Amino acid sequence: MLFDTIATETTGRVALIRLDRPKALNALSDQLLTELGKALDAFEANDGIGAIVLTGSEKAFAAGADIKEMATKGFVDALNSDFAAKVDRVARCRKPVIAAVAGFALGGGCELAMACDFILAADTARFGQPEITLGIMPGMGGTQRLTRLVGRAKAMEMILTGRMIDAAEAERAGLVARVVPADKLLDEALAAAEKIADFSAPIVRLAKESVNQAEEMSLADGIRFERRVFYAMFATEDQKEGMAAFTEKRTPHFNHR
Ligand code: CAA
């Protein structure tokens, strides 16, 4: 696939999407978000792909929504174009998406990373929601996802002051799954994606969906959802294969569709 603002490649069952607007620190222009959506559509429709890694450059995962594009927008333009909703495409992806974040993940960049299933951060990563300094607030999910991930106190402090946090603080706060040395970031993210892509694709899909229900449902409803899905897994060949392989001390061969 050929794009102007992102680059894509595949290795085995893993797709890599690299945000590629180096001169604008990967600011999320409308074109970039549209191209990202198209790449996700293609990888989601491809049974040969089991997991996706989304990354930026050494200096920036993404420094936010494109300020130059937004600067002259009026309320009605913003409302009608609904430009901030394009990030939702990432959260709607049914295949796992790992954000591999080095450098700045600010504003919409932080929100894009949070729309992924989990974030692996380089020790150089810096996260923040500096929108308040521009006379706006986060609009790509930040007030909701950051609050769920790091709790009200830290989310409120970050959103109201615009303070950036480094990778270590982000890990302590629960924003990122793991911090790794910058030169190992991509290898670690690709290795995690490869591992996921080797498991049963339908079971991975259901596990992801079940974890996501935790944000939408009460505990009792969520447990009921989990229990139903868990029991349904016993109707799959992959449950038989996974457990047989364990007892027979061999590698399981899972369904990748
Ligand atoms: N939009 C558009 N262009 C951006 C950008 C953005 N979000 N962030 C950086 N750039 C551009 C700069 O304008 C600059 O371009 P020029 O060379 O043409 O001037 C280029 O990228 C390099 O940036 P800097 O020279 O500023 O680099 P730096 O190393 O000195 O600073 C930085 C890095 C601290 C990240 C700084 O660029 C910065 O503060 N960027 C803006 C961060 C921000 O406010 N993000 C939130 C955007 S609003 C948002 O995201 C809303 C939402 O929730 C939907």
Image: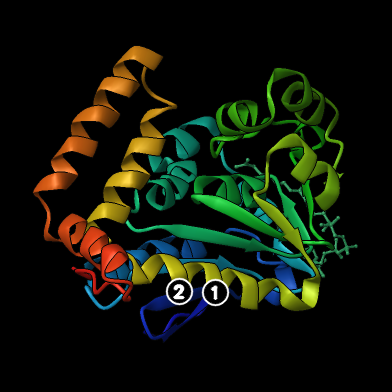
Q: Name the residue nearer the viewer: 30 or 194.
A: 194
Residue 179 location, x and y as percent? Answer: 75, 58
**Visible in this render: residue 197?**
yes
Q: Name the residue nearer the viewer: 176 or 192.
A: 192
Q: Which residue is tagged 2?
A: 194
Helix or strand or loop: what does disc 2 sit on?
helix
Quarter of the image where one finds residue 219: top left
Q: Quadrant of the C terminus?
A: bottom left
For badge 2, the amino acid type reads Glu
Crowding near the residue tagged with mark 1, few <14, some 14–19, many ≥20 C-alpha atoms within 10 Å:
few
Asked whether the residues under the numbered discs 1 and 2 touch, taking CB atoms below 8 Å apart as contact, a structural biologist would say: yes
Residue 185 location, x and y as percent? Answer: 70, 71
Please, is residue 117 above or below residue 20 in the view?
above
Horizontal side of 106 relative to 4 (left or right) equals right
> How many angstroms separate mark 1 from mark 2 (CA)?
5 Å
Horizontal side of 229 relative to 146 (left or right) equals left
Residue at 77% in and 19% down: 153
Horizontal side of 180 relative to 5 (left or right) equals right
Q: Name the residue nearer the viewer: 134 or 249.
A: 249
Helix or strand or loop: what does disc 1 sit on?
helix
Residue at 19% in and 60% down: 238
Crowding near the residue tagged with mark 2, few <14, some 14–19, many ≥20 C-alpha atoms within 10 Å:
many
Residue 112 location, x and y as percent? Answer: 56, 50
Q: Which residue is tagged 1?
A: 191
